[in-house]
Image: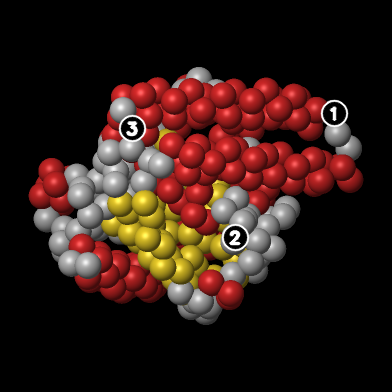
Amino acid sequence: MHLLKGFLACAALLAATVSVCIVLTWWAFKLNFTKNEARSELKQRMDDIIIWWTSANRLMIKFLGLTTANVQWHNRAEVSPNEWYLVICNHQSWADILILQTFLLDTIPPLKFFTKSQLIWIPFVGIAMYALGFPYVKRVSRDQIRANPALRHVDRDNVFKACEGFNNHPTCVLNFLEGTRFTAEKHRRQSSDYQHLLRPKAGGVDYVLQGMAGRLKTVVDVTIVYPSGAPTFWDFLQGKCKEVHIDIRQHSLPELTGLEDDAQRKAKLAQWTRQIWSAKDQLITELLDV
């Protein structure tokens, strides 16, 4: 039964993704020949297709009964699909993306998220994310930066460029602050200060705050807990993730006004992320005890 669910889920995902890519490829081509006045409207139509894509995936999850979600959204009435938000979340599995898209849909705008540059080569998915303006980030070592100092600002410039498009119409930018999926091995190597989380990185958040200054309304903080352990993406598609807890709440944007010194700004933002992460770590403990 699990194997059949997995094949049906893969088929549904593939069908939805290919359909999206066909439409996006045409619209992306058309965008090059569209005058400035109409480009804004076309870009918004391109983003609207994420809603169709996500709705198809949500229907697939519900129809196949892939998981049972216990969702607690605090002060849900305070958010709207017509505003801009920064979404932050802990990260354990590729299934996190499907879960976030499914259970945030219709309440806030479609999600755009930081994507590793290598993912652009994934058939269909990479093309779709590129056409939709997802910010691509690259892993650059210190040795590479020393050899070519210009690489220091590659990620920042990519995020700023993406944010120019995000300012066009209501958008949510998703950032997994840990920068990678949680594993026990990574947790051990980091000597993390948290029981259930890796250390948060504030750099990506800082780029978004700068690139979308004056647009972002608030921070939507999502905590995902898998009581039986984080599933692989394939396990999730097979329906082996019986239950997931999702806690969603809002935070005010960090107060960084007047901090002209870059070091002061980074220190204040790092303190802000650590406070949120400490509360999230405690929340995960509580949800695992439910």
| Residue indicated by mark 3 | 238
Residue at 49% from the left image edge and 67% from the top image edge: 219
- Give x and y (percent) for residue 201: 33, 56
Mark closer to the observer (3, 1): 3
| Residue indicated by mark 1 | 33
Residue at 86% from the left image edge and 34% from the top image edge: 34
Residue contact at pointers 3 and 2, CB within 8 angstroms: no
Identify which amino acid the numbered label 3 is placed on: Gln
The disc at residue 108 is: 2
Q: Secondary structure at mark 1?
A: loop
Answer yes or no: is residue 209 visible. Answer: yes
Which color mode does the image show? secondary structure
- Give x and y (percent) for residue 178: 31, 53
Identify which amino acid the numbered label 1 is placed on: Phe
User: Which badge, 1 or 2, is on the more N-terminal residue?
Assistant: 1
Q: Is 103 rendered above or below residue 14?
A: below
In this orientation, which residue lies closer to the viewer: 144 or 76? 76
- The reply, left or right, for residue 55 in relation to residue 188 is right
Residue 238 image-quadrant placement: top left
User: What's the distance in space between the residues labelled 3 and 1, CA to CA?
Assistant: 43 Å
Quarter in which the C terminus is drawn: bottom left
- The reply, left or right, for residue 269 in relation to residue 62 is left
Mark closer to the observer (1, 2): 2
Identify which amino acid the numbered label 2 is placed on: Ile
Label 2 neighbourhood size at 10 Å, few (<14), some (14-19), many (20+)?
many
- Give x and y (percent) for residue 234: 32, 31
